[in-house]
Image: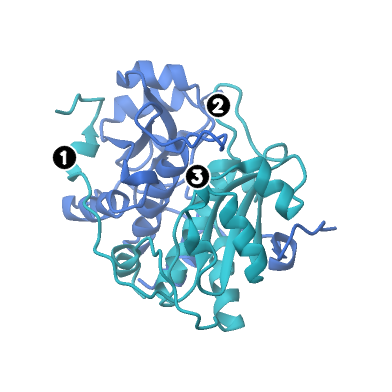
Chain colours: A blue, B cyan
Amino acid sequence: MDIYECILNRRSIRHYTEKPIADDVVRRVLNAGRLAPSAVNLQPWRFIVIRSGEMRRALVECTRGGKQRQLEMGTMALVACGNERDCYQHQGNFLKTYAIDVAIALEHIMLAAAAEGLGTCWIGAFDEPAVKDLLDIPDPWRVVAMTPLGYPDESPDFKGRKPLAEIVCYEKWEEKG
Amino acid sequence: MDIYECILNRRSIRHYTEKPIADDVVRRVLNAGRLAPSAVNLQPWRFIVIRSGEMRRALVECTRGGKQRQLEMGTMALVACGNERDCYQHQGNFLKTYAIDVAIALEHIMLAAAAEGLGTCWIGAFDEPAVKDLLDIPDPWRVVAMTPLGYPDESPDFKGRKPLAEIVCYEKWEEKG
C-alpha cells in the first residue's frame, strides 16, 4: 500500500474480530519494525508477541482503570520494550533515545499493519511495574508502549488534526494563536 | 511508494545536492507528520523549517562536536519540538508522551520524504539549550530531534539489523543470547 494511503488509513482500532493472522503477515509486520532506524544503530528494542487470551486479559488489568479491553479482543497483542542502558544519550541532550527508537519501530509496525488490513492502537496508559512483573521483563528494559494487533471490527472516522499553519514555523520559533 | 519499499529505501543521508525542493513536496511531507497519531490526540508537536544557510550553519555548531554538517548541506533542515506540559502522562507510567509522539510524527515525515526521493537523517546529539536559544524556542517546548531534508548526493548501503529471532519474544520475556 502507498505510504500516504497507509498514513491516511491508519486508525486507532478498539474492536477486533477473532480472525487469526497468518504467520507470514505477522512476520512482515514485525520485520517493518526490525528495519527501523535507531541512534547509532543500537536497535534497543524487544517486542513481545502475546497470543494467549489469559495473558492478554491479565495485560488489560495492567492498563489504566483496566479499560484497554481491546488488548484481549482479536488474537494478538504486542508489548514494545526499550533498553534504557544500552541506548544512546548525548550529554548535551536530555533524552535517552530508547523511547524514541522504540516509538519509531512500533510506528513502522503499525503502518505495515495498516497496509495488511490489520488494526492497532497505541496504548501508553499502564502500570509499568505491573506489566514488567506479568511478563518477567528484567531491568534495564522498560515498557514503552503496547498495542493489540488484529483484524478491525469497526471503521472509525479519522480524528481531526491541527492545520499545518498551526504546527509549522519558518526559520525560527513563531508564536501561534 | 509502497510502505515496505519506503521502509527498505530509507537511509540516513549525510550528503545532499543543492537542488531545491518544490513547495508542494514539502507540504506533502510535512502533512504526513501532521496526520500522525498522538496520545489523547494532543498533537504536542511543532516543526521548524529552516531554509537560511546561515541559520543551518549555526545549527551545525549546536550539534555534538559541530560535526553534523549534513544540516547545512542541501537546502533545508527541520527541527522537531515537543510540548512537555501539554502532553499526556499516565501516573502509573514513567514517560511523558511528547517525545514518543514527536518521534512518530517525524518518522512519518521521513518515510514520506523517502517516497518523494528525498533524504533525511535523525540527529539526536545536540546541545538542546543552545538550539532553543538559537531558534527562540520557549519553555515548555523541548527539542526532540532534527534532520536535514534534501535530495541525496549518495546511496549508502543499508546498515545491518539484528535478526527477528533476537528482537521478538513470544508470550513472555525470553533471554536472548
Q: Is residue B42 visible?
A: no
* Chain at numbered mark 2: A
Q: Quadrant of the N terminus of chain A?
A: bottom left
Circle 1: residue type: Ala
Pinpoint residue A74: horizontal percent, then vertical percent.
34, 43
Pinpoint residue A24: horizontal percent, then vertical percent.
17, 54
Circle 3: residue type: Ala
| Residue B165, numbered label | 1
* Helix, strand or loop status at disc 3: loop
* Chain at numbered mark 1: B
Q: Is residue A93 above or below residue B16?
A: above
Q: Quadrant of the C terminus of chain A?
A: bottom right
Mark 3 or mark 1: name the one nearer the start of the chain.
Answer: 3
A110 horizontally vs B100: left or right: left
A73 horizontally vs B141: left or right: left
- Of residues B14 and B143, which is closer to you in this image? B14
- Nearer to us of marks 3 and 2 is 3
| Residue A64, numbered label | 2
Q: Residues within 10 Å of mark 2 (few under 14, many from 20)?
A: some
- Of residues B17 and A24, which is closer to you in this image? B17
- Nearer to us of marks 2 and 1 is 1
